Image (tube, rainbow, N blue to C red):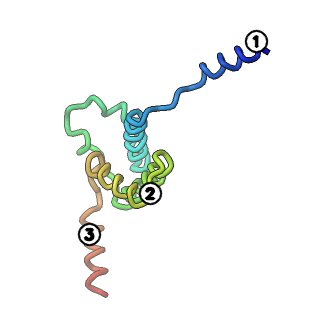
Amino acid sequence: MKHQLLELKNGLNKMAKRLTYEQKKDQSIIDLINKMFEIAGHEVTYDDIKDRKDNWFQEYTMTVEQSDEWKEWGKRYLMKTFRTPAHRAEMEMGWVSLAWGLKFSNWDEYHKKAQDADTTE
């Protein structure tokens, strides 16, 4: 019996430790940036750009639709990872997009369509 308890205790010590809240936040930024590049169709990762001091974010673009897809994915990711309410996760993705999001390749076209739709109503 003592031997079994010792084995159980040793097995528990070998289990992976939970991430702290700060570690989770750091990992979530990495995951969100990697997913942004993936959705935008760029073969780049966070590790490729993390140490760059230039304006790397101007080299890559995404469409407005890709940005919307990324924000929706990020919202679900944040809700699951941090058990965040939907409205809070949406707000956080807005800040993440502002801080690390890529510029839009089709903003003028998208904006013109939106204006045309407003004038026809």
- Mark 2 packing: few (<14 Cα in 10 Å), some, or many (20+)? few
Q: Earlier in the sequence, mark 2 or mark 1?
A: 1
Q: Nearer the viewer, mark 1 or mark 3?
A: 1
Q: Which residue is mark 2?
A: 85
Q: Which residue is mark 3?
A: 111
Residue 12 location (% of width, % of height): 63, 22
Quarter containing the N terminus: top right
Q: Tag 3's secondary structure?
A: helix
- Compared with 29, 50 (above or below) is above
- Mark 3 packing: few (<14 Cα in 10 Å), some, or many (20+)? few
Q: Residue at x 36, y 35 (%)?
A: 46
Residue 110 location (% of width, % of height): 30, 67
- The answer to whether any part of residue 44 appears in the image is no
Q: CA distance from mark 2 to mark 1?
A: 46 Å
Q: As drawn, is 65 to the left or to the right of 5?
A: left
Residue 11 location (% of width, % of height): 66, 20
- Compared with 74, 22 (above or below) is above
Q: Are marks 1 and 3 in contact (CB under 8 Å)?
A: no
Query: Given the image, on which type of amino acid does mark 3 rest?
Result: His
The extreme left residue here reads 54
Q: Which residue is mark 1?
A: 3
- Compared with 80, 107 (above or below) is below
